[in-house]
Amino acid sequence: MTWITQPRSKIGALATISTGTGPLVVLIHGVGLRSEAWGAQTEALSQTCRVIAVDMPGHGASPALVTGPNMADYVEAIVAVLDEPAIVIGHSFGAMIALQLAIRHPAKVKAMAALNAIHRRDADAKAAVKSRADELDGRTIANPTATLNRWFGTDVSPQRMACQEWLRNANPAGYRDAYRVFAIEDGASDADLNAIQCPVLCLTGAEEPNSTPDMSRKIVALVPNGRAEIIDGAAHMLPMTHALRVNTVLAEFIVSNL
């Protein structure tokens, strides 16, 4: 498929792609991306659900948060989209936000899926992500090649080209702010994960070097009602690179939690 720009509607302060009717499913993308990154999922899931893919604050057509944002600011910006209890699905930084929505607003979240979620980085990974965050000045966007190579390797693909365009045209301040929070955060606390009552699905790629399969397994070991699914051959951008498999897993998860 192609990841072309879609029309937006405004919900609260956020721009969204909203489509379909039925139970509410909310999709939250990762740092530097935009709601079109969920193109394959909005197309598939909107056949049976009302799907809202948000532009995270400072991304796509959504305005940046005002000053010094932290995780709670992103959570509170996105909770306004949940006008009824929803199934919330997040990818990468969006997965962190989705978990925090389940922790901070349990009545709003019927079930949640965390795709490529971070949980307890090792020392090398912490140093690397902090170094990348420290390089961001909020005025210019760094060459995205290194990021794209982490996500896709060096092969050219439509998915890589779409992400390259989004990264090159990202709001520099919005990107910096989100990446700094992403770098500081290291996953929800054990106590918070223990307290999540809704069903939790953790999904990641077998080839993912950062949001590793082991991280997903550790998260679901801590929540009362969780399961992990690892997709063979996939890495960080599995919603785009392995859309058919991801859509199948998510559709089954949604149906089982309506």
Image (spheres, rainbow, N blue to C red):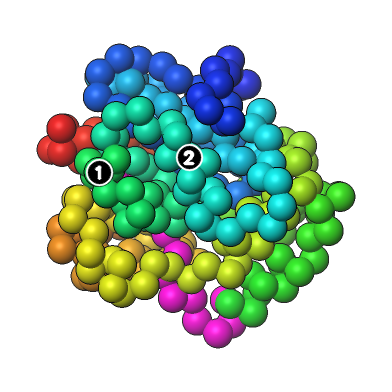
Asked whether residue 129 is in view, the answer is yes
Q: Residue at x 35, y 15 (%)?
A: 20
Sort mark 2 into few (<14), some (14-19) or many (20+) by Cα contacts within 10 Å.
many
Q: Which residues are magenta?
A: 112-125
Task: Identify residue type, mark 2.
Answer: Ile
Residue at mark 2: 78
Distance, label 1 to label 2, CA atoms, is 15 Å
Of tags 1 and 2, the one toward the viewer is: 1
Secondary structure under tag 1 reads helix
Q: Residue at x 55, y 21 (%)?
A: 10
Q: How many marks?
A: 2
Q: Is residue 129 left or right of residue 222?
A: right
Q: Is residue 6 left or right of residue 109?
A: right
Where is residue 224? Give x, y as percent.
15, 63
Position of residue 35 relative to residue 204, above or below, is above
Q: Residue at x 24, y 53 (%)?
A: 200
Q: Is residue 216 left or right of residue 125?
A: left
Determine if the magenta segment contains residue 31: no
Q: Quadrant of the C terminus?
A: top left
Secondary structure under tag 2 reads helix
Task: Identify residue type, mark 1.
Answer: Ala
Asked whether residue 203 is in view, the answer is no
Where is residue 3? Give x, y as percent.
57, 26
Where is residue 41? Give x, y as percent.
39, 30
Residue at mark 1: 107
Sort mark 1 into few (<14), some (14-19) or many (20+) by Cα contacts within 10 Å.
some
Which image quadrant for residue 159?
Answer: top right
Q: Nearer the viewer, residue 237 or 65?
A: 65
